[in-house]
Image: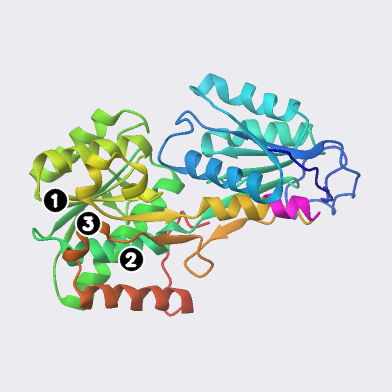
């Protein structure tokens, strides 16, 4: 396809990146980089992680189609790739560089400081710099709905969650999930237990990485042995191990995260996917590219919420029969209460 160039009029620092609110407003400078292209750098999960790398790339492909920007991805395979890949993305001369994941925070900040004529966006991490736009999601809001759902469909009275690592973008899901379970217990006078996470101590079950599927299966088998029949893995590809355990053991369902697992995972997992806690990263990417195109790019964070459609829960697909109309109605009521501010889902990891 042919690609068009687009205008690039952002306010940039003249020499180095300043923390927001700490120094005077940056001078406006003419752009020094080509704005006709964008480069994305993945974390070690790769492009097809069924998670935020994949959805971010899909958003840039959408921007490529709709806005004419040329998009390319640079795939990281390990920790040692991260800094060189961000440097390579900047060296391409593109006016926008997108990095994905907390692991890329330091290399992004370093390159942003050295290259004030380039705009950066980082997904799932907050960096305070004049030419870096954080793209974050208040997933606790949607996870709250998922926790309420899990408590409403469990037959054993036990549900569970685990993470890949104890990091704010992970534990934010877990906080919302256990709060949603607690809300169900409050409303219905039940005592559904949530294994794998304590909001009070901010500690719980973690596999230690986001790639080893076997670790996810082992941890999930342990939860099932303790009676859990709904599992929320917040661990990227590791979550596929939870889905495999659910299929193998039977009578267990999984709540996926980031993307709709029913659509992105192997079709063999569809019978166990109850719902997914969604991050609408695609729309955020298109919006940011459009802002660059319009000369309106700023470092103001994009925060996805239920209200702006940045987070949501997916359809129940094949397991819709588990969700009574009454339960579905209660979840819709909670959604509206969160949007209106009547219910505030709190977390120390909230963006």
Which mark is first along the chain, 2 or 3?
A: 2
Residue under the point 42% across and 36% down: 49
Q: Is residue 314 left or right of residue 6?
A: left
Q: CA distance from mark 1 to mark 3?
A: 20 Å
Foreground mark, 1 or 3, reads 3
Residue 208 image-quadrant placement: top left
Q: CA distance from mark 3 to mark 2?
A: 19 Å
Q: Give the secondary structure at mark 1.
A: loop
**Number of marks:** 3
Nearer to me, 171 or 269: 269
Give the prevailing secondary structure in the magenta stretch.
helix
Which mark is first along the chain, 1 or 2?
A: 2
The residue carrying pointer 3 sits among few (fewer than 14), some (14 to 19) or many (20 or more) residues within 10 Å by Cα, namely some
Asked if labels 1 and 2 touch by Cβ distance under 8 angstroms, the answer is no
- The x and y percentages for residue 182 are 25, 67
Q: In the rendered image of this protein, does residue 290 appear above or below residue 333?
A: above
Where's the N terminus, which quadrant? top right
Figure colour scheme: rainbow
- The x and y percentages for residue 44 are 47, 28
Q: Which mark is residue 145?
A: 2
Residue under the point 18% across and 33% down: 218
The residue at which mark 3 appears reads as 318
Q: Which mark is residue 9?
A: none
Q: In the rendered image of this protein, does residue 338 appear above or below residue 71?
A: below
The residue at which mark 1 appears reads as 228
- The x and y percentages for residue 256 are 32, 49
Q: Magenta part of the protein: which range?
A: 289-295
């Amino acid at each position: 396809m042919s690609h068009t160039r687009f205008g690039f009029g952002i306010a940039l620092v003249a020499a180095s990146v300043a923390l927001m609110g700490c120094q005077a407003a940056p001078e406006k400078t003419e752009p020094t980089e080509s704005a006709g292209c964008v480069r994305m750098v993945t974390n070690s999960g790769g492009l097809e992680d069924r998670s935020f790398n994949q959805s971010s790339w899909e958003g840039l492909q959408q921007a490529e189609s709709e806005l004419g920007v040329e998009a390319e991805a640079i795939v990281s395979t390990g920790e040692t790739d991260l800094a060189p890949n961000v440097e390579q993305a900047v060296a391409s001369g593109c006016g926008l560089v997108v990095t994905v994941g907390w692991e890329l925070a330091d290399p992004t900040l370093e390159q942003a400081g050295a290259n004030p004529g380039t705009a950066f966006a980082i997904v799932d991490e907050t960096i305070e710099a004049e030419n870096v736009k954080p793209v974050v999601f208040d997933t606790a809001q949607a996870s709250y709905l998922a926790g309420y759902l899990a408590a409403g469909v469990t037959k054993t009275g036990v549900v569970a969650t685990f993470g890949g690592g104890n990091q704010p973008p992970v534990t934010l899901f877990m906080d919302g999930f256990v709060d949603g379970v607690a809300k169900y217990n409050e409303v219905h006078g039940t005592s559904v237990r949530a294994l794998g996470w304590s909001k009070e101590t901010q500690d719980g079950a973690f596999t230690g990485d986001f790639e080893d599927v076997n670790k996810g299966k082992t941890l999930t088998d342990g939860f099932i042995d303790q009676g859990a029949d709904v599992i929320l893995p917040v661990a990227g590809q590791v979550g596929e191990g939870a889905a495999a355990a659910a299929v193998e053991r039977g009578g267990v369902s999984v709540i996926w995260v980031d993307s709709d697992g029913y659509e992105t995972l192997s079709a063999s997992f569809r019978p166990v996917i109850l719902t997914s806690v969604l991050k609408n990263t695609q729309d955020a990417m298109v919006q940011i590219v459009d802002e660059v195109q319009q000369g309106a790019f700023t470092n103001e964070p994009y925060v996805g919420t239920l209200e702006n459609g940045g987070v949501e829960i997916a359809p129940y697909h094949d397991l819709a029969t588990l969700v009574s109309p009454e339960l579905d109605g209660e979840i819709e009521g909670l959604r509206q209460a969160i949007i209106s501010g009547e219910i505030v889902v709190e977390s120390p990891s909230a963006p």
